[in-house]
Image: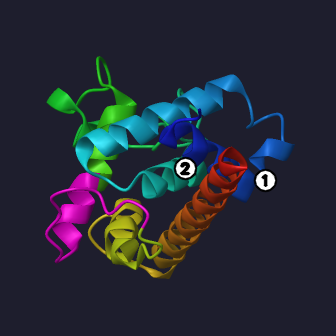
Amino acid sequence: MASIAEILCFALFMVTDADRNPNYYDEENFEVCLNLVDLAFAQGVDPEIVIATSWVESRLTEGLVSYTGCCHGPLQINPYYHCPDNRLRGCDLSFYGVNALKRYRDRYNEKNYSEPLYRIYDFSEWAEPLCHYNAGNVCNEQSRRYARLIINIANEVSYTYDAIEENYLMTCVQ
């Protein structure tokens, strides 16, 4: 039986058509996705948002460095702001990337989060946090588009997850 993380990652690959592109649909990308889902659950962040953000930022590539050289990892964080001692060395970029999303969510959203809002089909409360995650202190039109893109992917992943789960349960019952 497939785990929640496996189904979510498979749903992401289906939604983004990554399953049709051998550059993005391989064991390494899938492992990055599974790790991010586990970290999201552990830190109380919506896993769909985390994997959608990682897809947009790096196509789930573990060691990616931005063209400017300042952002690293699957969630493209700046170690100066998000890693212990403001250093890349020894920083778990996946863990601190999820932690950065959580911090932006907590800072730029009025809702009180005690646990993830898993499978809610409406990630609109992430619009402002994702906008700031992308742009910093001041959101602009480009960062608002970025937030909408991630929210749309997260919603599609959530819908696809439910369709896969429902189909799987129907097959088990028959």
Q: Which mark is residue 57?
A: 2
Q: Is residue 122 visible?
A: yes
Q: Residue furthest bottom?
A: 141
Instruction: Point out the frontmost of discs 1 and 2.
Output: 1
Colour logic: rainbow
Secondary structure state at the residue bearing disc 2: helix
Quarter of the image with the N terminus is top right
Residue shown at 52% from the left, 36% from the top: 3
Whole-percent x, y for residue 51 in the image: 51, 49
Label 1 and label 2: CA atoms lie apart by 16 Å
Horizontal arrangement in the rendering, residue 19 relative to residue 75 (left or right): right
Whole-percent x, y for residue 33 in the image: 54, 37
Horizontal arrangement in the rendering, residue 84 relative to residue 36 (left or right): left
Q: Which residues are magenta?
A: 102-119
Q: Is residue 97 visible?
A: no
The residue wearing badge 1 is: 17
Q: Along the polypeptide, which appears first: circle 1 or circle 2? A: 1
Query: Foreground residue, 19 or 138?
Result: 19
Look at label 2 and name its amino acid. Glu
Look at label 1 and name its amino acid. Asp
Q: Is residue 154 above or below residue 123?
A: above
Mainly helix, strand or loop, the magenta region?
Answer: loop
Quarter where residue 77 is shown: top left
Residue shown at 39% from the left, 36% from the top: 38
How crowded is the residue under tag 1: few (<14 C-alpha within 10 Å), some, or many (20+)?
Answer: few
